[in-house]
Image (spheres, grey):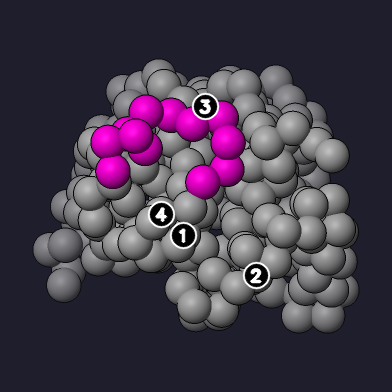
Amino acid sequence: MNLASLLSRERINLELKSTKKEEVLKDLVYMIKSKTDAELIYTTLLKREELGSTGIGKGIAIPHCRSLAVSKLEIAVGRTVKPVDFNAIDKKPVNLFFLIIAPPQDPGNQYLITLGKIVQIAKEITRANLLSKINTPDEFIAKINEIEKGMSKKR
Amino acid sequence: MPKEIDIMRLLKRLFDLDNLITDKEADKKIGFKIDEEVGLMSLKKERASLLKEIPKEYAETYERLKKRYPLAIAEVKNGFCFGCFQQLPTEMLTKSNEIVCCPNCGRILFWREE
């Protein structure tokens, strides 16, 4: 499963203006769905955040859930202009968000595998301080591709 | 009594909420922090409140199905129930505004809005 192939430039916004957790989640969800589907996902994501913040530290959050609103794995990426308080594990504000929504039926555990992979890639992005060097969605996808290739070589 | 479309909306919320609770162990293994006390309690409260909003007959059907299957709601796709993968009778092939169950496995069926 190649993460870069699941990304599309229309679903990457590197200039989100939102300043609150709820607003960012809404921005991300509406990149994927609209109307009642978006509302269902948004409600579920808020509940997921109550279970524990998906902010994994170092300025990254990976909000995620399974939902009847989608029929396949859907991903959106957002970078906020200003870091947002997300109650992250390290208590630091977040500015890079990967939203992952999976259908309830998930043959081959694609969702959890992708989720694990995004955690690794996101950490690599911050470790190498790559985020500030990325300016466009196409550059973002290319960078993810590069990181993935590097990770598969190490295996 | 809420309209069937609203009941289905509530059932979907309940279903997504149940999946969050199911997935928490996998989330922990990946490295996400899970609040087993306040957080989980809040989800359980929400679950109880949703169940109260859903008319009794549907809430009971959902709870009964949940005991039997990991996923109590199944999508209808190309005329098949995607819970048991059995073809549905002709009269059930088009989207219904009523809440219906698969005649084979009993799961609550839903049609995706395109």
Q: Amino acid at mark 4?
A: Cys
Quick one: which residue is furthest to the left in this view? Answer: A153
Labels 2 and 1 in the same subunit: yes
CA gap, disc 4 and disc 2: 16 Å
Q: Amino acid at mark 1?
A: Arg
Q: Residue at x 52, y 26 (%)?
A: A33
Residue A33 tag number: 3
Q: Chain of mark 2?
A: B
In the figure, A118 relative to A74: above or below?
below
Labels 4 and 3 in the same subunit: no
Tag 2, which secondary structure? helix
Counting other residues with Cα less than 10 Å from the Cα at mark 4, is it few (<14), some (14-19), or many (20 or more)?
Answer: many
Tag 3, which secondary structure? loop
Horizontally, residue A31 falls left or right of residue A61, namely left
Q: Amino acid at mark 3?
A: Lys
Labels 1 and 3 in the same subunit: no
The answer to which quarter of the image holds residue A142 is top left
Counting other residues with Cα less than 10 Å from the Cα at mark 3, is it few (<14), some (14-19), or many (20 or more)?
Answer: some
Q: Are marks 4 and 2 in contact (CB under 8 Å)?
A: no
Q: Residue at x 47, y 72 (%)?
A: B70
In the figure, A66 relative to A134: above or below?
below
Q: Chain of mark 1?
A: B
Q: Which residue is label 2 attached to?
A: B63
Q: Position of residue A40 (x, y in %)?
A: 64, 39
Segment colored magenta: B89-100
Residue B102 tag number: 4
